[in-house]
Amino acid sequence: MNSSTDRYDYSTLEVDTEAQERNQKQYAETAAAAQLPEVNQHANEDLNYPEVVAGGKGIIDPTLPEAVHTPGTDAEKILSTSEPRICGMRRKIFWAVLIGAVVVIIAIVVGVVAGVLTTRHNDSTSDTTGNQSGAQGDTSNATALFTNTNLATANFTDEFGNENYLVAYQLNNKAIYLSAWNSSHKSWVVSPIVDGKTNNLGFDSVRKGTALALDIYAYNSSSRDIHVYWQLPDSGGLSTIKALTYNSQKGISTQTAIPAANWIDSAAGNNYISTAGSSLASYGKQCDLCNQYTYLYWQTSNGIREASYQNSSTGWYSDNSVIQVNISPPSDNSSLAQAHVAAATTNGHRSMNIFYRSTASALSQIINGDGRYVGHELGRDVGPRTTIAAFSTGFNETSTGWSQPLGFQVLTMDPAANDGVQLTYYKGNSWTAANNQVQDLSDCKARGTMVANHARRVYCLVSGNGDGPEIVEYAWQGNPDDPATYSNYNRIGTVVTTV
């Protein structure tokens, strides 16, 4: 083997052109090389390749640019080594391989990232809706009704005697909207509350699947405020409560859309913290013989808390303790429903009534009236995921023989029992758990979301004709004096939620 200093010898003699011709004829390999494009044997000063330089007019230097191995020195042919190589490969091949490898790596990274993001999205959706019933539906439309939205409702009678119904709900993109109906206008009007771009409230200011509360505070028949409450995204199992007010100076309308910019911050916002899965319930003054202030209820790990607003001087107040009654506290993430009771005279007893499921599984009531709290169990056991809706009838008077005695209609849906909508009612100073389900509300069962207002209207989330849900309105047709009519409801129609 040659040493590391061995090298091929190249002739420095002047080329004998006649000998060159003889060599070309004699050695086929050299003749074949002459046919390669790197050497043009017929180049001239007007037609030549960069690799071949004319030595003068009419004279071509036929010397090959590469070393040529003469026969007999080695059995192995020595190939040209003039082309630069990278890692032992021709440059073109090296760059092709490198680019191919980079493309493959990028494809793998993109695939992994997409898979991780999809998994996180699915996990987030599962966390948000894991305790809700119903299919996910089509979530591709950001401004469509959220499949597992909670609902809130309120009502008022205006100075013209028209009935007004309001329903709050959440969209797929986490926005909160309000649909309003005026009995004179006879059409649903859709307005934004939190649209993700107004009042410095982005969608990161709303919990997906947030609890909702809505109430009306009436100054008189022609002037009123609207209050809405929701939750921030979870943080360590807790959620901060947010609140907005649409005050009477802005000109509340249920016949035309009201702008999101007219909602203003409420002092209740950012001051109170609920458990992440807590329901919210609220109340605003409804009449001169109703409770006179604004109230908010939510759940903590120890029970139900209350905050109230009396006037601008005192502001919002809460003593940081839970409501204490002589019955069991609410179970974790219990549904909360509020039904207020008016008095017809100054001798009556006005109150707010909170219905919930207790840790003992009992459907329970807390009465907030006459400056005290009283608890009652209603004689029905319900499961941990039971939805509760309630409204009152009549007035709470002390005199006997009152023509419109106090009554309550409490509706429950227990997915574990799978027995549809059940009725528990109050009449004649006692509670009764009806045996039969409320058939007129059977469509409410599948999705398990239901609320009611003081106008005896019930709103349920039901499966629509397409993939998504719809909000359906029902009107109670019962006679407070006849329990046989208590399960009678009329389906009014679908609440318009189109944005």
Image (cartoon, rainbow, N blue to C red):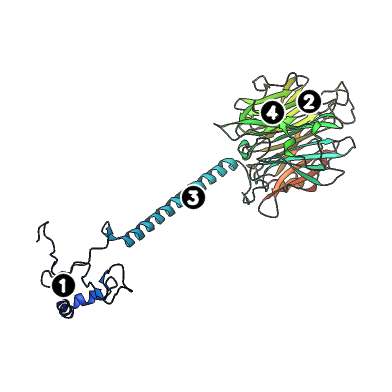
- Identified by mark 3, the residue type is Ala
Q: Residue at x 27, y 63 (%)?
A: 83
Residue at mark 2 to residue at mark 3: CA–CA distance: 54 Å
Discs 2/1, front: 1
Mark closest to the chain's N terminus, 2 or 1: 1
Residue at mark 2 to residue at mark 1: CA–CA distance: 121 Å
Element under label 1? loop
Discs 3/4, front: 3
Contact between marks 1 and 4 (CB within 8 A): the answer is: no
Residue named by callout 4: 297
Element under label 2? strand
Residue named by callout 3: 114
Query: Is residue 83 visible from the viewing direction of this image?
Result: yes
- Identified by mark 2, the residue type is Ser
Question: How many numbered marks are there?
Answer: 4
What is the number of the mark on residue 15?
1
Mark closest to the chain's N terminus, 3 or 1: 1
Discs 2/3, front: 3
Residue at mark 3 to residue at mark 1: CA–CA distance: 68 Å
Contact between marks 4 and 2 (CB within 8 A): the answer is: no
Q: Position of residue 45 (x, y in %)?
A: 30, 73
Instruction: Please tell me whether residue 389 is drawn above or below residue 82 in the rendered image.
Output: above
Contact between marks 2 and 1 (CB within 8 A): the answer is: no
- Horizontal side, residue 153 vs residue 345: left or right: left
Q: Nearer the viewer, residue 194 or 338?
A: 194
Q: Quadrant of the N terminus?
A: bottom left
